């Protein structure tokens, strides 16, 4: 077990190396400039989708626009920007939040570019079961440039790493958290919770993209509402502390000693790196 943990630590050091993170930030800045800050110019697009401005019952496609938006939100609101923020603060101090803001400002362009390219290069041979994603972008885009073999190789590698990430860093970890909470507060054994979650999720996935869209369209609005209400409640309860907290976040980003040394990370570099990691992870791009 110790050897496996050491292997994971080594792999983590490679995948989350500072140079990889800097490359992600640089990509975000490049895309932001290249698309003319499109991630902010298009902020009104989401509300229009919610209002059904683009809905047309005669349009081809397995799900409607709102269901697609809900499915996207279901993958981004959760582990990364709730638990991930708390972890970043615990490890890097309050200053990590500042760097999450900065990196998130540019990181949104990576998500925008990924989704746009996925739509342009998706496979629509079967209108009721479309396929898209970075693997299709790599395969089709590079094939047009005479590098089809390289594109398919990149696509396969992406799919394999995505499967591992989804099973471990996504579903497994979140299911484990739910199991721990139900066992601690409701005395329900975690293995029972795991079985229930597996059955429910399996029933949705087996139904294909249409069922996923319907379930996401029904559950995600409730989830987002609870998320916003809970966050607003915390802000209202501590409204008097907000100015001091903002000041602490900014000061801790450059002068970590302002945080009082109560956090594991004691340097500005720690705040920057942990904020960068959580910001890069939370947008799911």
Image (cartoon, grey):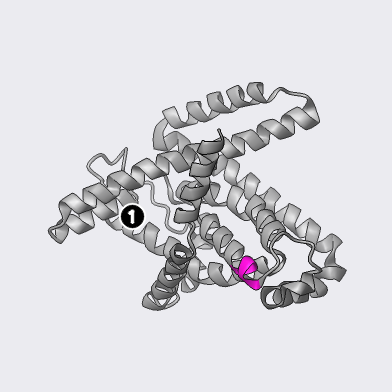
Residue 175 is situated, as x and y percent measured from the top left of the image, at: 60, 34
Give the secondary structure at mark 1.
helix
Vertical position of residue 125 compared to residue 185: above or below: below
**In the rendered structure, which segment of residues is drawn in magenta?**
268-272
Tally the numbered discs. Answer: 1
Residue 261 is situated, as x and y percent measured from the top left of the image, at: 78, 66
Vertical position of residue 141 compared to residue 260: above or below: above
Q: Nearest the camera: 229 or 151?
A: 151
The quarter of the picture where residue 282 lies is bottom right
Residue 189 is situated, as x and y percent measured from the top left of the image, at: 71, 22
Residue 242 is situated, as x and y percent measured from the top left of the image, at: 80, 70
What residue do we see at 59% from left, 28% from top? 197
Q: Is residue 136 magenta?
A: no
Q: Is residue 271 magenta?
A: yes
The secondary structure that dominates the magenta segment is helix
What residue do we see at 70% from left, 76% from top? 250
Q: Nearest the camera: 15 or 205?
A: 15
Q: Going by the image, does 224 lie left or right of 56?
A: right
Identify the image quadrant of the N terminus.
Answer: top right
For residue 7, say whether it is visible.
Answer: yes
Identify the image quadrant of the C terminus.
Answer: bottom left
Q: Residue lying at the far left in this picture: please name it.
A: 146
Q: Nearest the camera: 133 or 254?
A: 254
**Where does label 1 land, which residue?**
118
Q: Going by the image, does 277 lie left or right of 145?
A: right
What residue do we see at 38% from left, 74% from top? 35
């Amino acid at each position: 077990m110790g050897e496996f943990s050491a292997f994971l630590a080594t792999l983590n050091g490679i995948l989350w190396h500072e140079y990889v993170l800097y490359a992600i930030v640089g990509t975000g800045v490049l895309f932001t400039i290249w698309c003319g800050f499109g991630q902010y110019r298009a902020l009104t697009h989401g509300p229009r989708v919610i209002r059904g401005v683009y809905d047309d019952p005669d349009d081809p496609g397995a799900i409607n626009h709102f269901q697609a938006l809900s499915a996207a939100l279901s993958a981004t609101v959760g582990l990364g920007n709730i638990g991930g923020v708390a972890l970043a603060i615990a490890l890097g101090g309050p200053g990590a939040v500042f760097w999450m803001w900065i990196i998130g400002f540019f990181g949104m362009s990576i998500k925008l570019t990924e989704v746009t390219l996925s739509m342009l290069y998706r496979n629509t041979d079967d209108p009721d079961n479309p396929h898209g994603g970075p693997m299709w972008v790599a395969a089709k885009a590079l094939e047009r440039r005479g590098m089809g073999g390289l594109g398919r190789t990149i696509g396969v590698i992406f799919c394999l790493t995505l499967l591992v990430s989804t099973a471990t860093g996504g579903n497994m970890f979140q299911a484990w958290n739910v199991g721990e909470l139900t066992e601690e507060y409701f005395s329900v054994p975690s293995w029972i919770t795991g079985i229930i979650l597996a059955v429910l999720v399996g029933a949705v996935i087996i139904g294909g993209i249409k069922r996923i869209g319907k379930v996401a369209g029904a559950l995600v609005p409730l989830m987002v509402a609870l998320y916003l209400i809970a966050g607003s409640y915390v802000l209202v309860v501590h409204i008097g502390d907000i100015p001091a907290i903002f000041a602490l976040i900014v000061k801790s980003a450059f002068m970590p000693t302002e945080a009082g040394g109560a956090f594991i990370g004691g340097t500005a570099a720690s705040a920057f790196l942990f904020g960068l990691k959580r910001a890069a992870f939370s947008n799911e791009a």
